[in-house]
Image (cartoon, grey):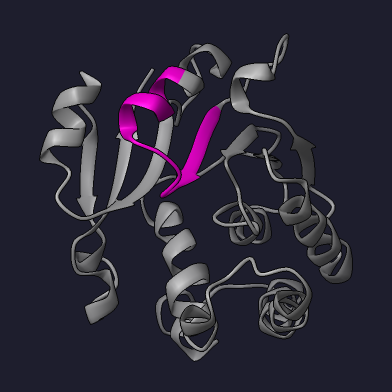
Amino acid sequence: MEIIQKYFADFSETQVQQLSNLKGLYNEWNEKINVISRKDIDNFYEHHVLHSLAITTQFEFMDGMEIMDLGCGGGFPGIPLAIFFPNTQFHLVDSINKKLKVVNEVALAIGLQNLSTQHCRAEEIKNRKFDAVVSRAVAPLKDLWYWSKPLLKKGSKPNGLICLKGGDLANEIFESGCKPRIWEIEKIFETPFFKDKFLLQVPL
């Protein structure tokens, strides 16, 4: 938790409590349903929470916006973002229901009122649009954009696909046909873990 407070100092008491409770809850649930690798749980706040919050350093989601977390897994980046933006609505989608069970139970335990979940694939969502889609290390950019584009509202700011990725992205970006904006996360959070990790936005 100290590493979060190193970079973010203006949380409310409620937000601090919610963030502080996450580690224990994920430890408990990870014993039942493996949603975080064993080697990562020891670095939970840096590898999962801080990584998710990289999005907040470049984008501000306005009150009342609706954001979809595509392939949320155990709840990242959606849960940290829902804590950070309590007046923005987050809809977390995953094709694996047991992961959503963890998301729902964690959200309930910390009192998150602005989060909903849906057990499906992104391409199955019909008749609903979002201001932005966020995602973390789910699929190649080409696929993420193909799934996200039909779900995006026009005219929202920020908008488009906002995703966290790592490694050499040159081929992946080329194959996607997209021209994303790119930020190096190690220049935002100066720790070795974030070397070769990037924040991308593909605007609509």
Depth order, front residue of 126/49: 126
x and y percentages locating residue 11 in the rendered image = 61, 73
From the viewer's perspective, tell me whether residue 177 is left or right of residue 154. Answer: left
The residue stretch that appears in magenta: 132-146
Q: Which of 107 and 35 is in front in this view?
A: 35
Q: Residue at x 64, y 56 (%)?
A: 75
Q: How many numbered markers are drawn?
A: 0
Residue 127 as seen in the image, left or right of residue 104: left
Q: Magenta segment: does it hold 135?
A: yes
Left or right: 87 with respect to 121?
right
**Residue 161 in sight from this viewpoint:** yes
Vertical placement of residue 84 versus 68, above or below: below
Residue 28: name its quadrant.
bottom right
Q: Is residue 59 above or below residue 203?
A: below
At x 77% / y 54%, what residue is drawn?
98
Quarter of the picture containing the N terminus is: bottom right
Residue at 75% across, 57% down: 103
| Residue 174: % across, % down | 14, 26
Residue 29 position within the rendered picture, expressed as x and y whole percent measured from the top left: 76, 75
Residue 71, percent from left and from top = 57, 42
The foreground one among 150 and 114 is: 150
| Residue 102 drawn above or below residue 164 | below
- Quadrant where the C terminus sits is top left
**Is residue 178 at least partly visible in the picture?**
no
Reply yes or no: does residue 27 show up in magenta: no
- Asked if 75 appears above or below 66 in the picture, the reply is below
Which quadrant of the figure has residue 123? Answer: top right
